[in-house]
Image (cartoon, coloured by chain):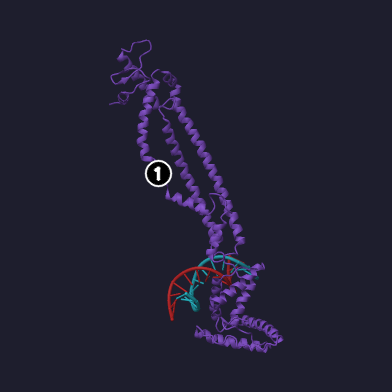
Chain colours: A purple, B red, C cyan
DNA sequence: GTCCATGATTACCA
DNA sequence: TGGTAATCATGGAC
């Protein structure tokens, strides 16, 4: 069965504008005739169908050039045939839509959206991702010494956010413009060829899907930029900062005054961390955590043990400093007529490493010698080894 | 750019 | 679980 015959069959049962129905085919009576000339009408319909089928195979310009468009539009059979063609096309379109619509949400897109939202790039601006920056910094173990880095991070994140939104706006604008253009074209063409509103809608959806994929690329690039930014600014390893001079002095004082047992307890570590962090409020240092104190002592023990000679001068220096501090304390005590007899520093500690014990014992002698040749009394120590 | 100092990380051990 | 040793990676002086 050829196309024309199929369409003619499809016309069966369709009432065209309330005209009479004959033999399953609704046909309008020819103007000025009684409608008995069936063969003539069939020929008429055949002609118009042929013209329509031909014109759909041609470009609009080509069709217009041949003045067919106007002729067809003015043909008395055009509205009826046109609506039938629309109906057929609608049925075809439905079967295509059934396979294409109702796509599940793309999990990759969802991940990207969630990440952009969490980083403060998309969604409402909430301080440019400072929460994310703070969370990452806290995870890195330095909770409050990141104000400068945070401001840099926020500035960069704000730039990313701005670029993202600008690009997104451009894409949306381009999408809208293109959609409008295509819709206008289709509406224009719908006067000539059978294009239903649903088909236009389907085309719009296709366009939106295409632009969505472009948007996804934008989101992916933005996420990558944020990840790079995070690793640059917030990665703990990259963010290593030397401790302040004051903090290093505090730690060294403790280390050299506890040389025979340089293993501060948790309480001592906390106290040291607190003492070191106080310098922050004076604006001269960085906050130091208990974990960092542990790291520092770990490194110090290893490096001291590896090269005692190198650290000898430093040890003497801190021994002298400790002695001075202790002398002041003792002087104050004497003034109060409270005669507390100082205990021997570092007494009663168990060494964890025999080799280290020997080295430290030698050094301890040096320290004590320095203390007493300098005329300073030994410092007072608490039971846990802390200086009073 | 090189070199050294140093804070952080990791694997391993007791 | 805390300490050691090796190593990485960065800061800073030169």
Q: Residue at x 56, y 45 (%)?
A: A166
Dividing the image into 4 quarters, which one contains the N terminus of chain A? top left
Q: Quadrant of residue A234?
A: bottom right
For this orientation, the residue located farthest to the right is A335
Could you tell me which quadrant the C terminus of chain A lies in? Answer: bottom right
When the figure is inspected, residue A201 is found, relative to residue A137, above or below; the finding is above
Asked if residue A299 is positioned above or below residue A193 in the image, the reply reads below
Picture residue at 65% right of the left edge, 82% below the top? A322
Judge whether A23 appears above or below A350 on screen: above
* Residue A185 image offset from top left, x and y in percent: 47, 30
Chain containing mark 1? A
* Rendered location of residue A104, percent (x, y): 40, 46
Q: Which residue, as the protein is rendered here, is positioned at the far front? A: A337
| In-image side of A118 versus A368 (left or right) | left
Q: Nearer the viewer, residue A26 or A37?
A: A26
Relative to A99, is A124 above or below?
below
Instruction: State how many labels appear.
Output: 1
Q: What residue is drawn where x is 52% and y is 64%? A: A139
A344 sits to left or right of B10 = right
Q: Mark 1 — residue?
A: A103
SS at mark 1 in the image:
loop
Q: Local crowd at mark 1 within 10 Å, few (<14), some, or many (≥20)?
A: few
Asked which quadrant contains residue A317, the reply is bottom right
Q: Residue A271: percent from the left, percent from the top?
A: 59, 75
The image shows residue A233 at horizontal and vertical percentages of 56, 60
Q: Determine which quarter of the picture holds residue A241.
A: bottom right
């Amino acid at each position: 069965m050829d196309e024309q015959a199929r369409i003619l069959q499809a016309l069966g049962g369709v009432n065209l504008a309330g005209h009479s129905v004959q033999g399953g085919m609704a046909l309008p009576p020819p103007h000025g005739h009684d409608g008995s000339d069936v063969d003539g009408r069939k020929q008429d319909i055949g002609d118009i169908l042929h013209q329509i089928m031909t014109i759909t195979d041609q470009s609009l310009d080509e069709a217009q050039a041949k003045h067919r468009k106007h002729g067809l539009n003015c043909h008395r059979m055009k509205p009826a045939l046109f609506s039938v063609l629309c109906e057929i096309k609608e049925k075809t379109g439905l079967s295509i839509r059934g396979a294409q619509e109702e796509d599940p949400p793309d999990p990759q897109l969802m991940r990207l959206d969630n990440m952009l939202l969490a980083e403060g790039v998309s969604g409402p601006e909430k301080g440019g991702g400072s929460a994310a920056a703070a969370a990452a910094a806290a995870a890195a173990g330095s909770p409050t010494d990141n104000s400068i880095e945070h401001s840099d991070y926020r500035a960069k994140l704000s730039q990313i956010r701005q670029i993202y939104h600008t690009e997104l706006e451009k894409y949306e604008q381009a999408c809208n413009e293109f959609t409008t253009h295509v819709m206008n074209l289709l509406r224009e063409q719908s006067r000539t060829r059978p294009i239903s509103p649903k088909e236009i809608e389907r085309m719009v959806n296709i366009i939106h899907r295409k632009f969505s994929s472009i948007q996804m690329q934008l989101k992916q690039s933005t996420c990558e930029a944020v990840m790079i930014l995070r690793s640059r600014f917030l990665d703990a390893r990259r963010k290593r900062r030397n401790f302040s001079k004051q903090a290093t002095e505090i730690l060294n004082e403790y280390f050299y005054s506890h040389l025979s047992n340089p293993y501060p307890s948790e309480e001592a570590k906390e106290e040291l961390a607190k003492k070191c962090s106080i310098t922050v409020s004076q604006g001269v240092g960085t906050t130091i955590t208990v974990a960092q104190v542990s790291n520092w002592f770990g490194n110090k023990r290893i490096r001291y043990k590896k090269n005692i000679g190198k650290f000898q001068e430093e040890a003497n220096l801190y021994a002298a400093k400790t002695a001075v501090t202790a002398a002041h304390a003792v002087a104050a005590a004497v003034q109060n007529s409270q005669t507390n007899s100082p205990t021997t520093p570092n007494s009663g500690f168990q060494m964890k490493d025999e080799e280290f014990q020997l080295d430290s014992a030698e050094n301890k002698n040096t320290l004590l010698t320095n203390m007493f040749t300098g005329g300073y009394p030994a410092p007072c120590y608490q039971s846990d080894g802390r200086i009073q």
